[in-house]
Image (spheres, grey):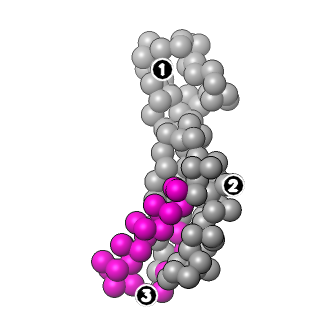
Amino acid sequence: MHELSLAMALVEQLQEILAQEKVSKPLAVTVAIGALSGVDHEALSFCYPLVTAGTSLEGVALQVEEVRLRVRCQDCGRESQPEEVYLLNCGACASARVEVVAGREFTLRALEVA
């Protein structure tokens, strides 16, 4: 389960930000997880409280924004959202010549503090 190591790295990053900004009361953390990121948001949500235990982030809510897959067609230039992550075709012309423009991210979006 690589989500445990991701949760640990996230907490490390958050603690660095809190120390750098001299913040003592974090309230919530928001991360964006793309459909193609390989990150299971339920597993991450399970691991997060385990790795925050005993830290300044203990009890701080983890909010997850799911980022849908979006592709841009190299033939017709349009963007679309494929229904299946395993079949990356243009929604307008059905071309398989597409580039992923969203859906790979695992990003810290926000750290809410008091």
Residue 77 x, y percent position in the rendering: 43, 20
* Dot label at residue 98: 1
- The residue range painted magenta reads 5-29
Question: What's the distance in space between the residues labelled 3 and 2, CA to CA?
Answer: 27 Å
Q: Amino acid at mark 2?
A: Glu
In screen coordinates, is 26 left or right of 1? left
Classify 33 as above or below 15. above
The answer to whether the residue labelled 1 contacts the one labelled 3, judged by CB atoms less than 8 Å apart, is no
Q: Secondary structure at mark 2?
A: helix
The residue closer to the viewer here, 110 or 40, is 40
The residue closer to the viewer here, 104 or 90, is 104
The answer to whether the residue labelled 3 contacts the one labelled 2, judged by CB atoms less than 8 Å apart, is no
Residue 6 painted magenta: yes
Q: Amino acid at mark 1?
A: Val
Which residue is labeled 3 in the image? 24
Q: Does residue 6 appear anywhere in the picture? A: yes
The answer to whether the residue labelled 1 contacts the one labelled 2, judged by CB atoms less than 8 Å apart, is no
The crowding category of the residue bearing disc 2, from other C-alpha atoms within 10 Å (few below 14, some 14 to 19, many at least 20), is few
* Dot label at residue 43: none
Which residue is labeled 2 in the image? 42
Residue 33 x, y percent position in the rendering: 55, 49
Q: Nearer the viewer, mark 1 or mark 3?
A: 3
